[in-house]
Amino acid sequence: MATVGKTLLIVGLILLGAAIVWWYSFFEQVLGDRVKEASDCFYYTTDICSLGNVVGVVGDIPTYSPVAFWAAAAAMIAGIAFIALAPRRS
């Protein structure tokens, strides 16, 4: 079980890194130097995020979706749970 947990944790971290890169790349393309204004868009779709998604359709990078962040979080939480519930070696 610990091996599955470690694998899920690593997959979650990789997904989180990919989500960060995707979020930054997309909103930097839309907002330029004001990319920090879209920080809420990383984990939640607000009205401003939706507007950015409409504008971003004409860009080179696919529209960012917070589902990437939540998938990463779910994988990491599952990995931690598997590690915590794994039998201890003596």
Image (tube, helix red, strand yellow):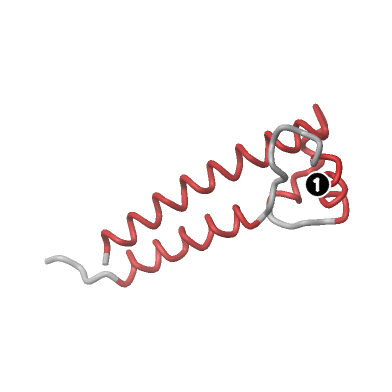
Residue position marked by numbered label 1 in the rendering: 53
Q: Residue 75's spot in the image, x, y percent?
A: 46, 60
Count of numbered tags: 1
Q: Nearer the viewer, residue 9 or 49?
A: 49
Left or right relative to 83: residue 90? left
Q: Position of residue 12 (x, y in %)?
A: 46, 53
Residue furthest toward the left?
Answer: 90
Question: Residue at 63% across / 40% down in the picture?
Answer: 22
Q: Position of residue 9 (x, y in %)?
A: 40, 55
Measured along the vertical axis of the image, is residue 53 above or below residue 9? above
Which amino acid type is shown beneath numbered disc 1?
Asn
What is the secondary structure assignment of the residue under circle 1?
A: helix
Above or below — where is 11 with respect to 28?
A: below
What residue is shown at x 82% (from left), y 49% (from top)? 49
Whether residue 82 sits left or right of residue 13 in the image: it is: left
Q: Nearer the viewer, residue 1 or 85?
A: 1
* Residue at position x 78%, y 43% in the image: 38
The answer to which of 85 and 25 lies nearer the viewer is 25
Q: Residues within 10 Å of mark 1 (few under 14, many from 20)?
A: many
Residue 13 image point, x, y percent: 46, 48
Relative to residue 1, is residue 17 depicted above or below?
Answer: above
